[in-house]
Every structure is written in structure tokens, then in C-alpha cells.
Image (spheres, rainbow, N blue to C red):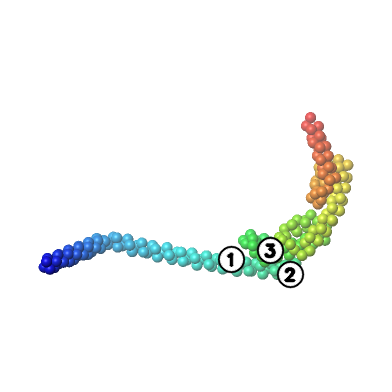
Amino acid sequence: HDLVLSLLHVVHVDQALVGARREQRRLVDQVGQIGPGEARCAAGDQRRLDVVGQRHLAQMYLEDLLAAKDVQKTDHDLARARELSKAGRHEKVLNLTERLRRADPKLHEAVRLENQSRFALGQRLYRQRQYLKARQMLDGIQGGYPGLESLRAAIKVQSKKQADVYYRDGVKLFLNDELERAVETWRLVLALDPEHEEAVASIKEAETLLQKLKTVQEE
């Protein structure tokens, strides 16, 4: 009985060794089947991967350089805007801050400088009695600004007074049969004071007369 078991054990070991040798030869044969062409192809793939990697690194480096250049340009423009603001050259400040905010709408320093210049220009236009332009300038201010509401209130009061003057000028033009010029003047009145009821009614009346005159001329 022990002899039979020993013989069976030897047979199993021999079969395992044979199977292992067969598997080893199969792997060797597969490796041997890789020809020079496939080896060159693998090397070429590796080179292409290296080139792609180098291009990616170069692109990242270029992007970093451009970003640094943009930051440097922004800092330069902001410094220039501050100098212009101190010199009272507010129109130039607006040109710079407009470009800066196009690039970065949330650039707080650019917004601050623009608000400051718009307020200063609004005050200047108010003193020059250019109330419509002053109001339009202040409308561009973002958020609150010290003294803004007081200046707007003063502009509104003076705009109404100026509108009354222009309305009387329009009446004179109307009485002189200069209907088109009268309408233009009354539209300016409404730009200064949108609630000017007399100007609204006068424009309607003048336009009605102009339409009748046109109809008569066509006949």
C-alpha cells in the first residue's frame, strides 16, 4: 500500500513539472515572436509620448508667463489710474478703468477709481449747468458713494428749472410755426424732467399739426 502511494506521488510531481515547463516554453515563444518592427513601433510610441509631455509642459509654462504678464499690466494700469485721479484727469481714468473692468468686472480697485472719477465729473458738469450729462455720469456709479444722493437731488431740482426754460423756448418756436424745432426742444425738456406734463401735451399737439400739414401737401 505504501509503495502504491509513493508511485502515485511521483507521477503527480512529474506531471506538474511537465506542465510548468510547457508554460515556460509558451511564454518564451511569445517573447521570441516580437520582431524588430514591433520593437521599433514601441520605441516610436514612447517618443511620441515624450513629445506630447514636453508640449504640455511648454504650454503650461507659456500660460504661467501670460498670466504673470497680465497681472503686471493690471498693476501698472491701476497705478497709472491713481496718478491720473490725483491730477484731476478723470476722463483718462475712466478710459483705463473701463478697459480694466472689461478684463475683470470684479476688480474692486478699478470700480473704486471709476466711481471716484464719475462723481468728480458729475460735480463738474453740475457746476457747468450740464444737468442731463451730470445725471448720466452719476448713473454709471456702482453701489453707494458719499454725497451721491445729495448731488442727485440737487441735479433734479436744477433740471426741473432748466426744463421750464426750455419749455418756454419751445413755445416760442411753436408760435413762429417752427414745429419740428419746437418738438425737438420739448423732447429735451422731457429728458431733463420726464414728468413735465405740458411738454408731453405740446409734443402731441405739434405732431398732430405736422401730420395734417403733410397730408395737405400730399394732396
Cα separation, mark 3 vs mark 1, equals 18 Å
Q: Residue at x 67, y 66 (%)?
A: 109
- For label 3, the SS is helix
Q: Are marks 1 and 2 in contact (CB under 8 Å)?
A: no
Q: Which quadrant would the C terminus be assigned to in this image?
A: top right
Q: Residue at x 80, y 47 (%)?
A: 187
Image coordinates of residue 56 in percent, x first then y, are 46, 64
Image coordinates of residue 80 in percent, x first then y, are 67, 68
Name the residue tied to disc 1. Answer: 70
Q: Which comes before the other along the chain, label 3 or label 1?
A: 1
Name the residue tied to disc 3. Answer: 111
Disc number at residue 86?
Answer: 2
The amino acid type found where label 3 is placed reads Val
Q: Is residue 125 visible?
A: no
Cα separation, mark 1 vs mark 2, equals 25 Å
Splitting the image into 4 quarters, where does residue 79 fall? Answer: bottom right
Q: Is residue 214 visible?
A: yes
Q: Which quadrant would the N terminus be assigned to in this image?
A: bottom left
Q: Residue at x 82, y 48 (%)?
A: 195
Front residue of this view, candidates 21 and 203: 21
- For label 1, the SS is helix
